[in-house]
Image: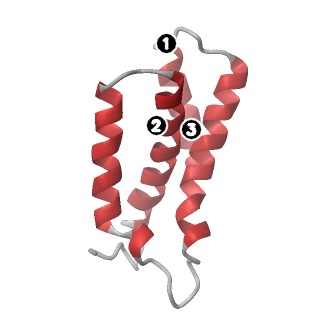
């Protein structure tokens, strides 16, 4: 799912980034996909300690606020790279909210 979100975000961004090129698009896709798997790399989804701090609603809210702050702020290449990572991470957490286990509140 992180890959699909990366492709959709890339199509949207293509009309707004003046220095958009194919290599940058590939990097954006990679960062979004990486961001979407990071929560499970940090906390094993099948272990006893799954879905702790990095799968929590608090992290979801913090990343959402950071994401919105970065969108409104300075639009540098670093900002776009960080936004793509956060977008991937957020997509993972939002999709986890639809699972049976949900997200812990802490």
Q: Position of residue 23 (x, y in %)?
A: 72, 23
In the picture of the structure, the residue carrying the numbered disc 1 is: 15
Q: Residues within 10 Å of mark 3 (few under 14, many from 20)?
A: many
Q: How is the image coloured?
A: secondary structure
Tell me which residue sits at (54%, 34%) in the image: 81
Of residue 13 and residue 82, the one placed in the foreground of this image is 82
Q: Which residue is mark 3?
A: 6
Residue 60 lies, in percent from the top left, at: 34, 58
Whole-angstrom CA distance, mark 1 to mark 2, is 16 Å
In the rendered image, is residue 1 in sight?
no
Q: Nearer the viewer, mark 2 or mark 3?
A: 2
In the figure, is residue 84 to the left or right of 97?
Answer: right
Q: Earlier in the sequence, mark 3 or mark 1?
A: 3
The image shows residue 39, relative to residue 26, as above or below, that is: below
Image quadrant containing the C terminus = bottom left
**Residues at marks 3 and 1, CA–CA distance in whole angstroms:** 15 Å
Q: How many marks?
A: 3
The quarter holding residue 3 reads: top right
Residue that mark 2 sits on: 83
Q: Mark 1 falls on what kind of element?
A: loop
Identify the image quadrant of residue 53.
bottom left
Q: Residue at x 66, y 24 (%)?
A: 24
Q: Is residue 53 visible?
A: yes
Q: Under tag 2, what secondary structure?
A: helix
Compared with 36, 19 (above or below) is above
Helix, strand, or loop for circle 3? Answer: helix
Q: Looking at the image, which residue is at 48% across and 58% down?
A: 92
Q: Residue at x 62, y 51 (%)?
A: 34
Q: Residue farthest to the bottom? A: 48
Return the residue nearer the eye: 43 or 77: 77
Label 2 to label 3, Cα distance in Å?
11 Å
| Disc 1 residue crowd, few under 14, some 14–19, many 20+, Cα 10 Å | few
């Amino acid at each position: 799912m992180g890959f699909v979100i990366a492709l959709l975000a890339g199509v949207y961004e293509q009309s707004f980034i003046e220095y958009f090129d194919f290599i940058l698009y590939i990097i954006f896709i990679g960062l979004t996909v990486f961001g979407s798997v990071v929560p499970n790399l940090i906390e094993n989804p099948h272990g006893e300690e799954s879905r702790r701090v990095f799968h929590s609603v608090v992290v979801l809210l913090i990343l959402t606020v950071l994401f919105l702050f970065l969108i409104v702020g300075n639009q540098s290449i670093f900002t776009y790279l960080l936004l793509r990572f956060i977008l991937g991470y957020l997509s993972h957490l939002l999709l986890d909210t639809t699972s049976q286990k949900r997200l812990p509140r802490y």
